[in-house]
Image: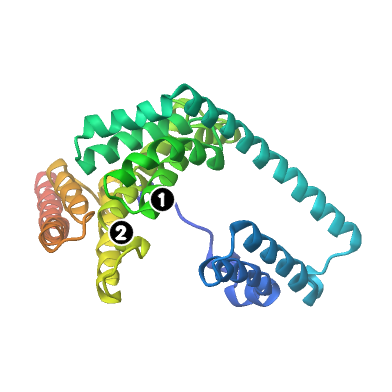
Amino acid sequence: VDHESVRLGMRGMPREELPRFVKVMKDVGHLSLSLIVLVVCLCVFNTSAIKAGLYASYTALIVALLRKNTRYSLRKLLDIMANGGKSVVGVASACACAGLITGVLSLTGLGGKIANVILSVSQGNILLALFLVMIVCVILGMGLPTTASYIIASSVTAAPLIKLGLDPLVANMFIFYYACLSAITPPVAIAAYGAAGIADCNASRAGFKAWWLGLVAFIVPFMFAFSPELLLVSNSGPLYIAYCVLTSCVGIWFFSYFICGFYMGKKLIVPIRIAMLIGSLAMVSAGLVTDLIGVAMITISTLYQVFVEKRLVSSEGAATESIAS
């Protein structure tokens, strides 16, 4: 989105209109303590998600009383409880619907058949299996909220991925990503179509544009699968984990340049755009050979944009001046 806005010449808000970080943290920074409590309960004390959420909610209610601008009255507390109850109803109904679909898949045996098809078609090829799971997750998640789509997709596709050797955390994170991305994947693309209604624009164009801009997110789960170090699922040291994170970020960054076709203030020609695609995808899997290929392709693309394109522009300008004279 950032690269696309640069290509279109869009500008952000003036700096003087942006909120100051220090002022924001001074006014409401204490409310972030509830998030810290949530993470600590989950990651350090290994409490259940329900308990962690409950402790974080208690923390938020307590720390909000510490400052006057966030302090609430009894009436406001009742409103908070009412709004929380209404939010829970939406999530609960979605989970109930997901439970019905999961039950149908289980009782009819369709879930097991889909898992068997994935295993038989992939023939142990993890890349092909991941691609098939991606398609299934996107189809099952269309038109559903995140929680429901993840529950349905994981009940069908988690088992074959784990059976093929993926860590359970990696497999479930892979499924969760594509369950979320189904919201911007045509032909349903329910999130993009809702946004089109707000923006009063063509729904189909908004859906396909959302999918194209979000295409970079479609390769992130494959990074998890081939580089579990990104999820800290590895016995490797911190240096290797940092190396994997760095190369993955570089690959994602330049893949987004390929998508928008604009780099260093200039339009990418087709061969250089293809080279940038190959270079960025080569850095998806953490490995010295693939990373060197990726760095070489990206370097060639950058050098072309810096020197060759600049020389072409200068020669075109000189030719125009000579014709005019």
Residue 248 sits in which quadrant? bottom left
Q: Badges 1 and 2: C-beta atoms under 8 Å apart?
A: no
Q: Residues within 10 Å of mark 2 (few under 14, many from 20)?
A: many
- Position in image of residue 158 (x %, y %): 39, 42
Q: Which mark is residue 173?
A: 1
The amino acid marked with disc number 2 is: Pro
Residue ranking furthest to the top: 108
| Residue receiving disc 2 | 228
**1 or 2: tag closer to the N-terminus:** 1
Position of residue 62 in the picture relative to residue 135 (left or right): right
Residue at image position (76%, 43%) is: 86
Q: Is residue 173 left or right of residue 223?
A: right
Query: In this view of the protein, can residue 35 be seen by the observer?
Result: yes
Question: Which residue is located at x 67 percent, y 77 percent?
Answer: 26
Please give the name of the residue rendered at 33% of the width and 39% of the height, measured from the top-left corner.
160
* Amino acid type at mark 1: Met
The colour scheme used here is rainbow
Q: Residue 299 location in percent, x, y?
A: 14, 61
